[in-house]
Image (cartoon, rainbow, N blue to C red):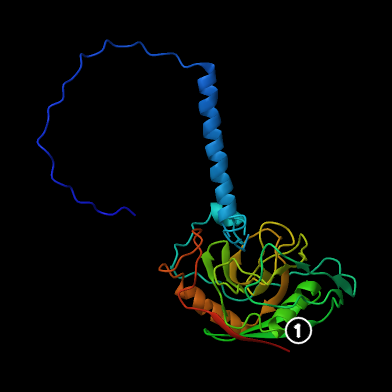
Amino acid sequence: MSEPDGRPGQPPYQYPQYSQWPPPVPPKRSSTTAIVLVIGSVVVVVVMALAFLAWGYPGFLRKPDAQAGGAFWTTTPSSATSAPATAPGTPASIPGGRASMPKRPKPLADPVTCAFTPDTGSPAPKKVALPPDGPAPSTGTAGVRLATSAGDIGLTLDRALAPCTVVNFLSLAEQGFYDGTSCHRLSVTAGLQMLQCGDPVGDGTGGPGYTIRDEVFPELTYGRGVLAMAKTQAPDSGGSQFFLVFGDTDIPPEYTVFGSIDGPGLDVLDTVARGGIDPSRPGPGDGTGPPKIPVTLTHVTTS
C-alpha cells in the first residue's frame, strides 16, 4: 500500500531550451527475431502465472521459507471454475447430513508393515519420538477426542482405510504433540470446505520431524465428516497436519483418509465455519486463512 507523500516547495521554474525538432523517422519493420522474442516472453509469463496458481492454492502443507519457499498446502478443486469463491470472512453455506465414508475396493493385508522416515530438512519444533516401525493391524477402529477451545470434536480412526496413518496419529496424540496447537487454516470456498490443524508452529510450516507414507486409492472422496491427512504436493510428505471436512470438498484422491468426525464435532466445525475467516490475520492468499473463531487443541485423548 502506498503512503501519502508531501510536495516540497519548488524552485522558480526554468524554461527549458528545446532543441530543433528532429525530422520524422520512417518506422522500422519488425524483424523475425524480435517477434520470436516477444512471443517467447509472453509464453514464459503465462507459464509462470500458471505455476504460481498451481502452487498457491491449498498441497495442504507449507514448507518453511528457508527451504524450498513453497507451501504445505491442496490443488485447486475442480469445481472452482464453475463456482464463485467465497470471500475471506464470509460465512459458509454448510450442507446438512453426512457423506458416506470411502471404502477400499479390496481389503489390505492384515497386518501391514509400517515405516516412518526422519525428515532432516524439516526439524520438529516439538520433540517427538517416531512411531514404531513394523506390523500394524488393518482392521478395527480407535477413538480420539479433540478437546478444543471451540468445543469437543470426536474422531473415529479407521485402520481398514489407513492403518499406518492411524498408528502415526495415535502416537502423536499419546505423546501430547497436539496439545496446545491451533487450527491455523479455514476454507469456506465452494469445493474446499475444511479446517486444517496439527501444526505445532501454527502457520502451516510445522511437522513432527518425520514423514509418513500415503495410504490412498483412486476411489477416495472427501465429503462432510471425513478426516484426512494434509501433505505437500510431493508424495509421502505428510506428518502431523490433518484436515476436518465439514462441507463440499472436491480435491484429487491424493490425501489419506483415515477416519470420520462425530455429529457434535461437526456442529463445532459448522459454528467455526459460519464465523468465517479472520481478515485481520495473515493467510496464504488463496481465499483461506485463520478462523475468526479460534480453535486451539487443549488436549487430545485416545480410547
> Relative to the observer, which residue lies in front, 282 or 121?
121
* Quarter residue 104 falls in: bottom right
Q: Amino acid at mark 1?
A: Ala
Q: Residue at x 49, y 57 (%)?
A: 84
Q: Residue furthest left?
A: 12
* Quarter residue 281 falls in: bottom left
Graded by Cα atoms within 10 Å as few (under 14), some (14 to 19) or many (20 or more), the crowding at tag 1 reads some
> Looking at the figure, which quarter contains the N terminus?
bottom left
Q: Residue furthest front?
A: 11
* Quarter residue 221 falls in: bottom right
- Against 183, residue 18 (above or below) is above
- Against 93, residue 5 (above or below) is above
Q: Secondary structure at mark 1?
A: strand
Report x, y in % for residue 20: 20, 13
Instruction: Tell me if residue 194 can be seen.
Output: yes
Report x, y in % for residue 35: 51, 22
Q: How many marks?
A: 1
> Relative to the observer, which residue lies in front, 11 or 299?
11
Report x, y in % for residue 190: 54, 62
> Relative to the observer, which residue lies in front, 16 or 104?
16
> Looking at the figure, which quarter contains the C terminus?
bottom right
Instruction: Tell me if residue 161 can be seen.
Output: no
Q: Residue at x 82, y 77 (%)?
A: 132
In this image, 189 relative to 121: left or right? left
Residue on which disc 1 sits: 142
- Against 44, residue 283 (above or below) is below
- Against 280, residue 181 (above or below) is below
Q: Residue at x 13, y 45 (%)?
A: 9
Report x, y in % for residue 161: 78, 72
